[in-house]
Image (spheres, rainbow, N blue to C red):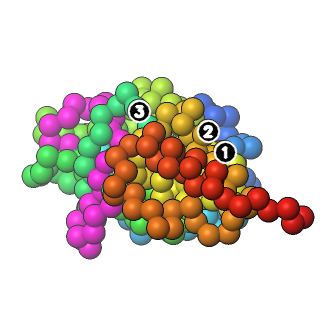
Amino acid sequence: MLNFVVALSEEARPIIQQFRLKRLHSINAFPVYSNDKIRLIVSGIGKLAAATATGYLAGIDDADKATAWLNVGVAGSKNLLVGQAVLARQIFDAVSQQNYYPTIYFDTSCLTAAVTTVSMPESQYLDDCVYDMEAAGFYSSALRFGTTELIHSFKIVSDNESSHVDEISKGDVVNLVEQNMEDIVQISNVLLDGAALLDDVGNGKEVFALISAKYHFTVSQQAQLITLLQNWFAIAKMSPLDNLDMDDINNAKTLLSELQKRVDELPLNYQT
């Protein structure tokens, strides 16, 4: 499952159309749309609204299934052109001074950037970052319900020093999201695949999350990792990472080799 969290109905509209989402009329607290793999909630503007909506959406999740999270919205920038999209590599809460660091384990065609969440629309653009009003609230809340590699924030520049925030129309917001739909779809597919992989791991979800956050895996290496973890937890109850210092292992290939060795050394269990 992939959960979208967006602030505005104009940000939501192209996503709803792209994925053919239907309104859930049984839910009144927030506008929520869904299909069999994706849900979208319209939170309203601001950090608190985003955090509340994220928590609400998590509350109606299937607890037995892994969920990915994607925040999509417009933002301001000092240097980037209007229409430029970025994936957050860092999220800074300007009020609490808290930093968050999403784990970007996949390749993406869009830029990555630091995102600063502010409490009011930013017009000064003092720092070389992207300014928004929801990412920190979304991310801090989603962390309670998911793993960092499956929680991301995608921002589209709507205003900068040459184009003031007050000049943005609702139609502009819709157009900006539509123009960047290819990247949104690509990231969505990656996150859906990641959630499916996490489901396949079963009892090894926590170990899988720890390993994925540290190393970059190819698709075939991810499949190998899942198989190793499935084999391990079919026999053993403790973590295969016990007494293993991952700081001494530099890449995914070496880690997989070490995990294979540990699986091979497990005693056979003939109990049923």
> Which mark is on residue 269?
none
Instruction: Tell me the SS state at disc 2.
Output: helix
Could you say where residue 129 lies in the image, as x and y percent from the top left? 19, 47
Q: Is residue 105 above or below residue 17?
A: below
Circles 1 and 2: CB atoms closer than 8 Å: yes
Q: Is residue 187 above or below residue 145?
A: above
Residue closest to the eye, 132 or 262? 262
Q: Is residue 99 above or below residue 21?
A: below
Q: Please state the extent of the stretch shown in magenta in the rendering.
A: 76-100
Could you say where residue 218 lies in the image, as x and y percent from the top left? 49, 33
Instruction: From the image, state whether disc 3 or disc 1 is nearer to you.
Output: 1
Instruction: Tell me the SS state at disc 1.
Output: helix
Residue 121 colored in magenta in the image: no
> Which mark is on residue 107?
3
Whether residue 51 is visible here, answered yes or no, is no
Could you say where residue 250 lies in the image, as x and y percent from the top left? 34, 46
